Image (cartoon, rainbow, N blue to C red):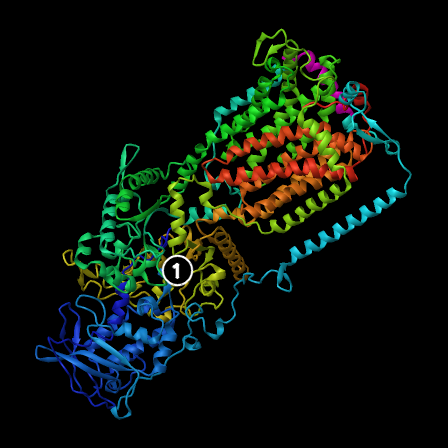
Amino acid sequence: MVPGGRRRGPAALAAAAIALMQISFLVFPISAQESNSSRVVPAEGYCSMYGICGQRSDGKVLNCANATKAVKPDTLFSSRVQSLCPTITGNVCCTVDQFDTLHQQVQQAVPFLVGCPACLRNFLNLFCEMSCSPNQSLFINVNSVKQINSTATVDGIDYYVTTNYGEDLYNSCKDVKFGTLNTRAMDFLGGGAKTYKEWLAFLGRQAKPNEPGSPYLITYRSDSSDSSGVKPLNSTIYSCGDPSLGCSCGDCPSSSVCTGSLLPQLNTETSCSVKMGSLKAKCLDFSLVVVYLALLCAVLLWGLLYRTRGRTAFPLKTKPLRNSDDKSDSNKNGKSPHNSVQVSEAASSTVKPSHPSIIQTYMSIFFRKHGIFVARHPLLVLCVSLLIPVLLCIGLLRFKVETRPEKLWVSPGSRTAGEKNYFDSHLAPFYRIEQLVLATSASGGSAAPSIVNDNNMKLLFQIQKKVDDLRANYSGSTVALADICLKPLSTDCATQSVLQYFQLDPKKYDDSGIDHAKFCFQHYTSEETCLSTFQSPIDPSTILGGFPGNNFTEASAFVITYPVNNKVETTGQENGKAVAWERAFISLVKEEILPMVLAQNLTLSFSSESSIQDELNRESTADAITIVISYIVMFAYISFTLGDRPSRWLSLFVSSKVLLGLSGVVLVMLSVLGSMGFFSAIGMKSTLIIMEVIPFLVLAVGVDNMCILVHAVKRQPDQSNLEERISDALVEVGPSITLASFAEVLAFAVSAINPMPATRVFSMFAALAVFMDFLLQVTAFVALIVFDFRRAQDGRIDCVPCARIVSSPTTGDGGDGQKLHLLARYMRDIHGPILSYRAVKFVVIAVFVGLAFASIALSTRLQPGLEQKIVLPRNSYLQGYFDDLAKYMKVGPPLYFVVKNFNYSSASVHTNQICSINQCNSNSLLNEIARQSLSPETSYIAKPAASWLDDFLIWMSPEAFGCCRKFVNGSYCPPDDQPPCCQFDQDSGTCSASATCNNCTTCFLHSELDNGRPSTTQFKDKLPWFLDALPSSDCSKGGKGAYSTSLDLSGYESGIIQASAFRTYHTPLNKQTDYVNSMRAARDFSSKMSEDLQMEIFPYSVFYIFFEQYLGVWKTAIMNICVCLGTVFVVCFIVTSSLWASAIILIVLAMIVLDLMGVMAMLGIQLNAISVVNLVMSIGIAVEFCVHITHAFMIGNGDRETRARQALSTMGASVFSGITLTKLVGVIVLRFAKSEVFVVYYFQMYLALVLIGFLHGLIFLPVVLSLCGPPPKSAKPIEQSQPASASTEQT
């Protein structure tokens, strides 16, 4: 974010501030020859100096060191003196010319302090007493004189004031704001003084010729010997809280009326915790531990009671349940295998299967008829099923990718999107940022050396020349920085650089050197020579970095910022010139500037407004090869796992299923392309997430279905013909495939209600892709299975079906005589029996439930956000830039509080509810912002707000007699130091006095205002004058440049200003949580103020639109997860008619998601749109781990233990090989991606998902089913058609 902001007051404010300090000094002359003056005896009614003796070489008038008696003025002169200095009555120690000089200079102080009348009165009294007090000799002693034309002039004085006077004077002014630059007036009037002594010392320093400041040394003293006769000045000081001269709460926070703030206090209370000895735990963590231990004890007690009942029950008779493989082994060995499944006769006799649901019955009938039809007409089914997705792919001709972040992560109806559009359309879009950061490097463990030296300054001038000379080509025309840069006064670019202390002129640097820059670091607000080319002070904290405290000379970094005009984009070409220049700028930095910087042993980081967009586009293609390799590896494994284990090496060419696996992958890709084509055809843009995630998701679902279908066909007896095998296989696994697929489709479809565009579009694309993949699996892929099995039966070679191996066995695709693969035997002989032990079950339940409880505690520690560095390529030049921003930047992003429909009419109270000068409400918007800035650690507001309203009211005030003025004909009259009131000399750069404006008068008299406020007509007529008035020394409150885009004048004649903005700054924001919390704090504050003031107020900063999602990301994530889980539960219940089974699936899915969130917290993965999409996707993949096992359990025979082992034997191998291993080999490849986002959000999260899903689906779920699974479903249509369907297993 650019430091310094875009709407800085582009005025000669520093010159004005210094001129204030001359008010009391211009009456004192200078001599050509120094001499020590004799001490004047202090006495009432006597002066220390009187009269004007001449002028300095720079034209400033001088007074004489003249110890004379105070003079009685005439009546007119006396009234003039009292109008400015009401404390001085009677005789005076100043002439009419001296008073005119005082009066002329006083007008420069008014714009700074008129908002706080008490401070202004005290400040003027200090000068009045010094210049005209009749008792001047009592507290002023001329301690040094010089001779000019034989006349003694003052060269130095002692000014005696009491300590109380000095402290009270400082306290009355120390908090007065200067809103134009979001700072305090003390920064201008006192050089940022922290005590009254520092302030008076700043006022008294002696200036060199042609420089603003005192022409002689003034020593302010508070000590005096009693015998000296000196009486230090101790006149009345008005407190800023004085009701008669009351200041606003923003200028006087200590006032008694300002003690109660309406600001919402952020919750800084520590979270609830429980302490036990030296251990301290959160209440939630402690509660989860207590509940977990209670559940553990309950399960243990139940197990003991169950075991006791088992010992007292009658012994049960058992008999072995044999499948075809067991039978063949028995025949060969002459005995039953020792590991045959033991089925309890008594148990099986007491378990009464419930009737299948109507849906299951119809599904079984449908799949039987469908399987027969496909087996008879595979070519027809293949062609027809491919026709629809192929036609949908035509829509890819309109395929477009949305890469604009605001279109991806922000809902069109979101609050921030509406506020941004309102701000851009009524005020102006936030400017574009081009930035360079040069820094020194630390070596040997020591601190980085200062970058402020002669060589580095000269390097900056070389860089600046290259940037100024840069030309970019746009549509045949050349574009330079001057063509696109932000120009507050329509003349010079608002470049933020240390070179501005030399007005970007190397000749001025050669004349003054590096010491001038160091001088400006401390006096940038008060030295005219430090002003920028666009006539604004440059805060060193915005152009330097790496300095401790305010020691700017120890800075280790230069920050150069080029603000560029921004335009609202409707066609995408409005900022074409700026984008063209930005890309040329980046090329220049890489090719020319970077080598120059490195040659000086410095580091360089850089960025442009379009850099992130360009780097994201580059990132989208950087890992294309990695993704392709990942898919190729998965395809290779799929082809391997679908194949058979040949009895002979030569049979491998026939039994392999590479062509079938490749065809299945093509179907998956076709479903994805068809989904993308459909949505492209209706005008919906795709996203990078869709292209990167959905193929992976659909492949995960599709591969599992492919494995299940192929294995189901292999399990059918070889004696059956192919039609029966295909139909029986579909009847067996079709319902579970349908259940899983429809649960996933509906879960994704319902998630499309999410307002976040990226998540909504992903859900819609995923739902259609999964649905199309399901249709292709049960049609085209089944047809391909028919072709492949026919090929294998004919002994034709895989991938080359025209070739044939005569000696190939015809029973290579399964059957009764084929032995099980290693994975299937493991599931049957090792995995299932191990899980049947009661101790193992107890450990499994305890561990998995414990992990779920731990994950609940960990998930509360998930932080919202998405680090910018993660989404960029690892080798991006922006990586170093973001590091340097966090390391060096001392200023946060600009923050605007926007007020809608401000009613400025005299009948409305809006003016006093917003402003922060005298007579404004104590709880006004700007007063509260000033209060908020006093606690930046919780408010994230660094400074008081710049207020066009305050400055306008001051500008109109009769006290600011140098600002709002008019000619006799009623037209606008500028200040005396602006043409035509003065004549500008091109050679000297000065403006000499002119008589043109001698007859100008203030716009209003006090009597013409209503309690100091303008009427509706006065406000309406003078507001355009104010916005067109240039700031200058005589009136620093002009609004041109500073407030040109701070309000919308469209239709303001009706008394309503549609939009007005008040600018302040956030504190430096270095972490994602800082951005989120700062936005939340600003919104809370605005909401409270809107409610209290009955006005519509909203905060705006350029980063809000990207971080709004994180304010509600938890709500979004929970809503999506709950909707998906609820949809899966409903679908499962409708299909299975079993509330019992549906509840178990729901619980296991919830535990998988919880564990995944716990892993995210441990790995430091943040909660954002990408992780929310992954969590939604995890439910879709987790369904595959649960539904097939549960469905196999429900259609099995025997007691729960037996059916759980049968489910593992028939489906466990398919699920493990179809999802777990396939995803593992594909995910591991993503570890080598170039982009950190792939490693963090795809490799780590996908790997965790696969492992967690595998553990829950194949360990926890079987144990739960064996303990409390639902009763079996009687599936007569299935049993009649395939009596031995569950007796064999092949993988």
Q: Was residue 738 drawn as part of the magenta stretch in this picture?
A: no
Q: Quadrant of residue 268?
A: bottom right
Q: Identify which residue, 107 or 277, lies in the foreground.
A: 277
Q: Quadrant of the C terminus?
A: top right
Which segment did they paint magenta? 361-380
SS assignment for the magenta stretch, majority: helix
Extreme residue toward the right, this view:
314
Amino acid type, residue under disc 1 in the picture: Ala
Q: Position of residue 552 (x, y in %)?
A: 31, 61
Q: Quadrant of residue 7?
A: bottom left
Extreme residue toward the left, this view:
150
Question: As displayed, is residue 479 above or below residue 967?
Answer: above
Question: As displayed, is residue 540 above or below residue 150?
Answer: above
Q: Position of residue 416 (x, y in %)?
A: 50, 48
Q: Is residue 1035 visible?
A: no
Q: Identify which residue, 145 or 889, lies in the foreground.
A: 889
Extreme residue toward the top, this view:
806
Question: As displayed, is residue 1122 above or below residue 691?
Answer: below
Q: Was residue 368 drawn as part of the magenta stretch in this picture?
A: yes
The residue carrying pointer 1 sits among few (fewer than 14), some (14 to 19) or many (20 or more) residues within 10 Å by Cα, namely: many
Q: Is residue 52 left or right of residue 1233?
A: left
Q: Is residue 300 left or right of residue 80?
A: right
Q: Is residue 940 left or right of residue 448?
A: right
Give me the residue at 40% from left, 44% from top.
879
> Can you identify the residue that label 1 sits on?
946
Give me the residue at 61% from left, 42% from top.
1156
Q: Identify which residue, 1171 or 1185, lies in the foreground.
A: 1185
Q: Position of residue 1098 (x, y in %)?
A: 49, 54
Q: Is residue 43 visible?
A: yes
Q: Position of residue 473 (x, y in %)?
A: 28, 35
Q: Identify which residue, 49 or 1261, lies in the foreground.
A: 1261
Q: Quadrant of residue 1043?
A: bottom left
